[in-house]
Image (tube, rainbow, N blue to C red):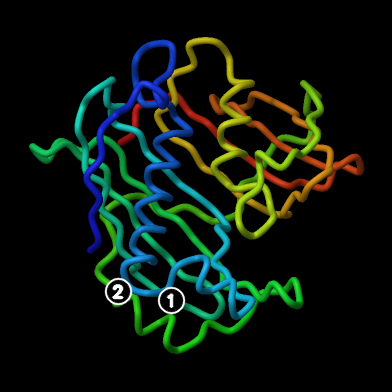
């Protein structure tokens, strides 16, 4: 298990003074990337050999979002490697062990020179010993969504949305999706699937839908091929 100590800063809070939904996802991702840094397999080092870990899906359960100034700890650990995929859990808690959020994530190993998934290098596997999976409900990495969608807005990808892979970072998708949620929509659970990597100059068509108590945000290209699918819920987690 790898852990990061953190504290809620003003630049990361929402209008209610709580760590924003997308900022929770950012904090989880940051902990994962610090883990990579500290075991000598940073994103920048992987880029030198045309490799990267790209996130395929998130499943985040929010118990309570911490408030401005509050300290918290993020833990992360891989629990499985299979084929091109790596599976990683996250736990966010207070210093007193109150659980704030927990998550499952699925990543795939990527060859940037071919633009295709790649077999995971053995030294990459060896760098991340696995631990038992967190006790939570595990859902499919595929997120189905309603056929009838409402187009809300179009956004052109600018350089501010890109990460070192020159793709829109997964946290940016979540941030943009949260922007079109209903006002005062308190997210208790998020499932997100990333299907297509958007690049500089691409146009994101942002659609929404509501069905069976879930709110969906779907980003597509002009031909309605999905980049991102987000399923949000306000239901109390069990």
Q: Position of residue 123 (x, y in %)?
A: 42, 87
Which residue is nearer to you in this view: 185 or 173?
173
Q: Position of residue 100 (x, y in %)?
A: 25, 35
Disc 1 residue crowd, few under 14, some 14–19, many 20+, Cα 10 Å: some
Quadrant (top left, top right, bottom left, bottom right) of the C terminus: top left
Q: Position of residue 212 (x, y in %)?
A: 58, 27
Disc 2 residue crowd, few under 14, some 14–19, many 20+, Cα 10 Å: some
SS class, disc 2 = loop
Q: CA distance from mark 1 to mark 2?
A: 8 Å
Quadrant (top left, top right, bottom left, bottom right) of the N terminus: bottom left
Q: Which residue is mark 2?
A: 130
Outermost residue toward the bottom?
122
What's the mark number on residue 32?
Answer: none
Q: Position of residue 179 (x, y in %)?
A: 60, 22
Q: Are marks 1 and 2 in contact (CB under 8 Å)?
A: yes
Q: Looking at the image, which residue is at 73% across and 77% down?
A: 113
What's the mark number on residue 81?
Answer: 1
Which residue is nearer to you in this view: 119 or 68?
68
Quarter location, residue 114: bottom right
SS class, disc 1 = strand
């Amino acid at each position: 298990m790898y852990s990061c100590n953190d504290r809620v800063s003003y630049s990361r809070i929402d209008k209610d003074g709580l760590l924003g939904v997308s900022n929770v996802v950012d904090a989880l991702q940051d902990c994962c990337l610090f883990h990579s840094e500290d075991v000598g397999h940073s994103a920048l080092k992987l880029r030198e050999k045309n490799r990267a870990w790209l996130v395929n899906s998130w499943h985040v359960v929010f118990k309570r979002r911490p408030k401005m100034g509050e300290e918290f700890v993020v833990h992360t650990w891989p629990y499985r490697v299979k084929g091109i995929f790596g599976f990683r859990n996250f736990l966010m808690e207070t210093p007193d062990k109150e659980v704030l959020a927990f998550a499952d994530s699925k990543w795939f190993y990527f060859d940037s020179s071919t633009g295709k998934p790649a077999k995971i290098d053995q030294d990459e596997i060896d760098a991340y010993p696995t631990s038992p999976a967190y006790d939570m409900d595990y859902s499919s990495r595929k997120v189905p969504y309603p056929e009838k969608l409402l187009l809300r807005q179009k956004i052109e990808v600018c350089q501010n949305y890109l990460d070192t892979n020159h793709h829109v970072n997964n946290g940016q998708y979540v941030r943009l999706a949260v922007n079109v949620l209903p006002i005062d929509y308190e997210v208790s659970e998020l499932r997100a699937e990333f299907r297509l990597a958007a690049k500089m100059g691409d146009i994101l068509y942002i659609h929404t839908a509501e069905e069976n108590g879930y709110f969906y945000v779907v980003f597509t290209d002009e031909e309605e091929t999905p980049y991102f699918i987000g399923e949000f819920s306000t239901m109390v987690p069990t």
